[in-house]
Image: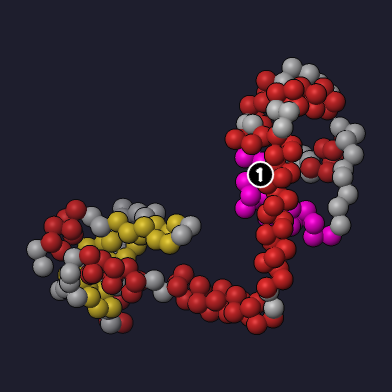
């Protein structure tokens, strides 16, 4: 049997009153705090450790105990977040419909394309690194598991999670270049055997 408790229910069960905020305000405050890093451990302490060290039982005891250890933390966090709110207000004033449209178009058209069609970028980057030429594969070559060529070397591009043993039935020609999607782009992993051949192009 499983039971689920929402934060609001926990507050109710512990008889802790929820502060009320106008619509959208908590989302804006969360965004400002993320940018300002107002409640990071260096500002307010490592909360998970502190709550475990706390010897009391009630909310009032916790507040007193915490404020004795970090008397300025709430003020410092408030200051950081308030400053970021002012920055966001200034940014909001610059946003108009055409800017929203540019942002939406970049997200829907450009970033989708980049996210799905990055093979060419990988091939070009590897080719440039080894001062070689590159080309994308033909549909026939794609059917043989070749995504492109660096110089005359056929390569296949696979995510780092690709398991060769699991995909033994897949007929791949040439070498595999692995990639890993990261927050700010891609990490490309070139196996030593391929690196050696590319160095000799």
Quadrant of the image occupied by residue 47: top right
Q: Residue at x 28, y 61 (%)?
A: 177
Q: Is residue 29 magenta?
A: yes
Residue 129 percent coordinates (x, y): 22, 65
Residue 183 percent coordinates (x, y): 48, 57
- Front position in the image: 161 or 107: 107
Residue 106 percent coordinates (x, y): 55, 76
Quadrant of the image occupied by residue 137: bottom left
Coloring applied to the structure: secondary structure
The magenta span reads 23-40
Q: From this viewpoint, which residue is outermost toward the left?
A: 200
- Front position in the image: 38 or 90: 90
Tell me how many marks there are. 1
Q: Is residue 81 above or below residue 180?
A: above
Quick check: 21 left or right of 161? right
> Considering the image in quadrants, where does the N terminus appear?
top right
- Front position in the image: 126 or 155: 126
Residue 26 visible in this rendered orientation of the protein: yes
**Mark 1 neighbour class, 10 Å CA radius: few under 14, some 14 to 19, many 20 or more:** many
The residue tagged with tag 1: helix, strand or loop?
loop
């Amino acid at each position: 049997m499983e039971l689920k408790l929402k934060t609001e229910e926990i507050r109710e069960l512990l008889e802790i009153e929820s502060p009320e905020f106008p619509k959208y305000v908590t989302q804006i405050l969360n965004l400002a705090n993320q940018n300002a890093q107002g409640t990071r451990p260096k500002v307010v302490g490592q909360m998970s450790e502190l709550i475990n060290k706390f010897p009391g039982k009630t909310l009032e005891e916790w507040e007193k105990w915490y404020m004795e250890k970090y008397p300025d933390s709430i003020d410092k966090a408030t200051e950081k977040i308030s400053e970021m709110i002012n920055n966001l207000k200034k940014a909001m004033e610059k946003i108009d419909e055409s800017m929203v449209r540019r942002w939406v178009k970049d997200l829907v058209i450009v970033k989708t394309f980049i996210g799905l069609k990055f093979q060419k970028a990988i091939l070009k980057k590897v080719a440039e690194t080894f001062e070689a030429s590159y080309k994308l594969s033909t549909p026939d070559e794609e059917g043989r598991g070749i995504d492109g060529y660096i110089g005359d070397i056929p390569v296949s591009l696979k995510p780092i999670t690709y398991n060769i043993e699991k995909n033994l039935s897949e007929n791949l020609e040439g070498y595999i270049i692995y990639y890993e999607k990261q927050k700010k782009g891609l990490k490309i992993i070139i196996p030593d055997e391929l690196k050696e051949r590319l160095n000799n192009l």
